[in-house]
Amino acid sequence: MIIVCKKSDDASVEMLTGKFESMGFRTHLSKGTESTIIGLIGDTSKISVEDIEAIDIVEKVQRVSEPYKLVNRKFHNDDTVIDVNGVKIGGGHFAVMAGPCSIESEEQIVSCAKAVKAAGANFLRGGAFKPRTSPYAFRGLKAQGLEFLLTAKKETGLPVVTELMSLEHLDLFNDVDIIQIGARNMQNFEMLAEIGKCRKPILLKRGLANTIEEWLMSAEYIMSGGNENVILCERGIRTFDTATRNTFDVSAIPVLHNLTHLPVIADPSHASGKSALVKPLAKSAVAAGADGLMIEVHPEPSKALCDGAQSLTPEAFENVMTDVRKLCGLENKIL
Amino acid sequence: MIIVCKKSDDASVEMLTGKFESMGFRTHLSKGTESTIIGLIGDTSKISVEDIEAIDIVEKVQRVSEPYKLVNRKFHNDDTVIDVNGVKIGGGHFAVMAGPCSIESEEQIVSCAKAVKAAGANFLRGGAFKPRTSPYAFRGLKAQGLEFLLTAKKETGLPVVTELMSLEHLDLFNDVDIIQIGARNMQNFEMLAEIGKCRKPILLKRGLANTIEEWLMSAEYIMSGGNENVILCERGIRTFDTATRNTFDVSAIPVLHNLTHLPVIADPSHASGKSALVKPLAKSAVAAGADGLMIEVHPEPSKALCDGAQSLTPEAFENVMTDVRKLCGLENKIL
Amino acid sequence: MIIVCKKSDDASVEMLTGKFESMGFRTHLSKGTESTIIGLIGDTSKISVEDIEAIDIVEKVQRVSEPYKLVNRKFHNDDTVIDVNGVKIGGGHFAVMAGPCSIESEEQIVSCAKAVKAAGANFLRGGAFKPRTSPYAFRGLKAQGLEFLLTAKKETGLPVVTELMSLEHLDLFNDVDIIQIGARNMQNFEMLAEIGKCRKPILLKRGLANTIEEWLMSAEYIMSGGNENVILCERGIRTFDTATRNTFDVSAIPVLHNLTHLPVIADPSHASGKSALVKPLAKSAVAAGADGLMIEVHPEPSKALCDGAQSLTPEAFENVMTDVRKLCGLENKIL
Amino acid sequence: MIIVCKKSDDASVEMLTGKFESMGFRTHLSKGTESTIIGLIGDTSKISVEDIEAIDIVEKVQRVSEPYKLVNRKFHNDDTVIDVNGVKIGGGHFAVMAGPCSIESEEQIVSCAKAVKAAGANFLRGGAFKPRTSPYAFRGLKAQGLEFLLTAKKETGLPVVTELMSLEHLDLFNDVDIIQIGARNMQNFEMLAEIGKCRKPILLKRGLANTIEEWLMSAEYIMSGGNENVILCERGIRTFDTATRNTFDVSAIPVLHNLTHLPVIADPSHASGKSALVKPLAKSAVAAGADGLMIEVHPEPSKALCDGAQSLTPEAFENVMTDVRKLCGLENKIL
């Protein structure tokens, strides 16, 4: 960590370096004409940049090493491969999680599960608890929805992924294969800490205005609780642009692959909000190196109770899968 | 609500208008050369724009009336005045909530409470549960912190405001006067729904990338649960700009005053992240019509365990208050 | 165009509809309980939304048809194919424009031209006039740089593309094959109008915070001058995210293909600012349907006078091209 | 400047420090376990961060001193006061520039000039050349508009400010008192360099997605040409928020006052795009320390050919001025 001090007398700078040394750091001083620079040597991951910047003689602070350790590729070079009931994600294994935004009935989720399985999906997704901007909108079938989802799992053998919206519901998730933490809960730190104590794979969606570093820090929360099974999911960020619901940050995929060993998947449905864009965005994600995709599929999108505008019909999904499979071939991904 | 349909045959449009009429809406048709427009007349607040956009012949949808009702000034023209143990907020009554970011010890919070009271604050703020980006950072004294806060309340008589981070802690908040919902929980819909059932005043901070409409929808969640005591707090939004921690959206204050009857306060400390900017931003908020301020004050900012860079010393806070009082005078606010 | 009026007396609304009718529009009225809606039928592309919103009884205005016509795919369904000295772009023809950010010497640009040609590029790029944030930075070899570029064109036969920064330099661009309008000049309307009068192909980069509609309006400026040869180039937008220099908006590619008949290429070098990201982003662009790529290649990136951090060595570029060719094969693009 | 190197052998680091020393810098080395840090001592304002980051062993680069010098308050502590025909801006002198967005006729601009003068404005603004997103919109009366503006100057004695859109028009600006560089030309570097050669005061608006540092670098362009009369004008930035046309960045005012000696004014009309918000935003700007305001006033906003939605009537402007004067009193500004 590099600390740039304002023009100040030697005594103040000495007091500061003394303070750091008493905390166990080695320090290294460099005096310029305009400012003095202190290099801090040691594990600075527990120090907050803001706290140092609060010190009166400090002008700015620059981290040299990343503030995350467990998720950091520097200390764990091999790709993490997550095994979900025999289906693998990461390290060359490609995951396709497909299904409706909301679970609406047993029939709907079961038929949808069969359709996406036939088209090549290896996971079933479906929401039982739905985050909705409006208190007047449909918020999911809740516990009953989970039951329907587990029926679909039983009928197709597909492992299931579904969103947890409150720790109070955790008991209901025993037979769920992957717990999804939604974009709006990416920095729900109490939830992250708690979920770190279980051993189920966690799908951590990126918050809509969160940096990649903040996202990795949230993954670090989960891993620091002892749960090493974290999958990151890029789902678009919020920008000034209104042509799409969110702006799909495709660069996040290779950027994350450099910084972390965790698998990274993409959700082109939420990223774009429009079914016509799902195919090109899904393909761009595979070409950029994604370890998987999460795609909304609904038997009759125009009757969907939620997010119909971005859902594919089973036929359209099959068509996407044809291209995805070709690209996985080029990228040497196992699907 | 206005629904613009793509060029399509009369039968499809008729089927759609029929569907809306069966839902209890009146419809109004307007045929152009390129598209047909359906006007929907009736209460559309429970209809989701995305759901309508999912219908294949629909090109775009435009709301005419706002999707929120209880918070809407159109249906409740008078300013809401919230009475917290005799101290009022809104409708000409100005609130100043001051105190440390984190409660660090009984002595710290009590002395800080006395100092901010002496300088003119009418509420004490202080965090017991702290949201932190890093799992390795100090996350507050938790239950013990709340106790210290209540001691400071007893010693000074100042009503207290502090953040709730998980519903599991709600029982500990019985003697807290205002429950703060932090920026990262602004769309924690389970929390909003639950908190709507209590009758304590809620301070709802704006999420860092949330629109004003989303913010009002979150307030609508709370009000639709039956709790009418909602205070909105602008605390800066996330933009491309890095000169300040967040970009203080001062326009949000007059925009909200047009749209809602709820009181609106500003937090210049979090908005800027820098103590030197607190005074000019606090003043700009008052001049723009804010109903109050939330300001971080710490006896020794450079020793703060959290957010020291943006905390004022008690002396600096007094200096801010001198100017705030003059501006309140000009604005006819009671402080 | 739909105009939502505030609750107002019939006389005011009649006056307004009368005004529109006198301008040659047909109007269509729909009265709700809260507001009256006027539908405007006719060519509204010359009406400004803001002007209508200024009228006191108007609450909001929504366009139904796009404000651009010449660039609109609705009125020109076939892909525009641009022929540059026999090399085609668009409609299945894939362009690869490669070369250094800045032209530094005759030797540098000639050797670079040979290298990128050998690796499969069909255009040479290179900057003679360089936009630089700082007045103290290297701003290009200017007229001499253009001469060196034209020498490289002669030696390799590659058509060349280079940026115009001021209309005063236009005379020097006679032998340039494609004139580039940089991101910072995307809304330099005087330049757009002037450049519309020439018949050379124009490469129009997206401004760093411009919406897709604004971008298309800038292309409309050029086309309305009579120049139909416009190529759009996505080069990343500015967002809160700092992991990359800009955020590459890969969705812009399919979105544009739906809205316009003009070819769309991508610049992964400027989008990311980091050479390690050029390959995955280039691939994602091809997979999303791009009609071409613009890539920075420099013989010795670490000695580049400008933008070295994002430049590829000729070897790295060859490696990118191997993958690009495979993807073009999948996409049925001719390269 | 601090250069963080990746783990690398001593020889490479030595070669790099040798290179810097040969360029006239002193270097200072600090070796950590993970990386080596080079401190560069000397005038680094001409070095580009990107160029250094292109060097293979370099991981990141952090500036310690600002890249601008002439605009920097560190080297010029006193506020710059700009004298425009006897009317001063900066250093306690408050400027109010008011008038229509577009000049539409001699009568319109003269009557508007008289009205704003009567209400207390000390400058007349009005656009003769108008930047418009659409090629089909009204783009100003151009040369004739300038003549009308100068007539209004003669009739009222108010100095005038108007926008320059192309260097080709510069000859027409001889009698204009302040040349405005619009937001879209903030990084038109050829224009900045040229305008730096004249001695007229320049009003430099902030680009809609430009950082404060980029803005100051553009001011540095003008000053490095020899023109010291630069006024900065905050006019809102582009964010995700759509409640207002732009997001008024009120913090920019105190941030700039810390970094530069140049005067800073605010344009609440363009920042908000809505006349109802002009008053609260104007007041917030004064309270935050602005040295002036630029406000759109039009005799009949609903008939304005451009930007009517944000224009005030003369009566509304008078009402704003009443409050502005009171706030200027509190702030000890001379108006």
Image: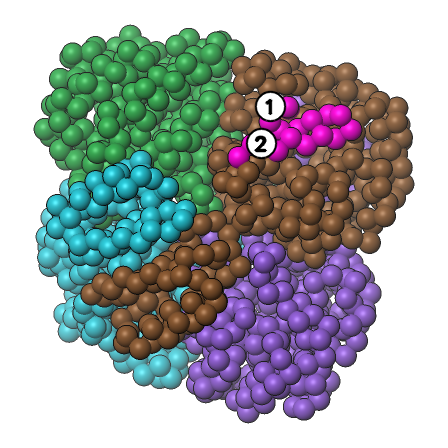
Chain colours: A green, B cyan, C brown, D purple
The answer to whether residue D274 is above or below residue D119 is above
B267 on left or right of A143: right
Query: Is residue C93 part of the magenta span, yes or no?
Result: yes
CA neighbours of label 1 inside 10 A, class few (<14), some (14 to 19), many (20+): many
Mark 1: secondary structure:
loop
Q: What residue type is labelled 1?
A: Gly
Give the extent of the magenta segment: C77-94
Give me the residue at 61% from left, 82% from top: D109
Q: Is the magenta stretch mostly helix, strand or loop?
A: loop
Foreground: C57 or D69?
Answer: C57
Work out which quarter of the rendered image holds the C terminus of chain A and state it. Answer: top left
| Badge 2: chain ID | C
Kindly tell me whether residue D190 is visible in this rendering. yes
Q: Name the residue under label 1.
A: C92
Q: Name the residue under label 2.
A: C79
Residue D284 position by quadrant:
bottom left
Q: Residue A267 carries which label?
A: none
Which mark is in front, 1 or 2? 2
Foreground: C171 or A169?
Answer: C171
The answer to whether residue D61 is above or below residue D214 is above
Mark 2: secondary structure:
loop
Is label 1 in contact with label 2 (beta carbons under 8 Å)? yes
| Badge 1: chain ID | C
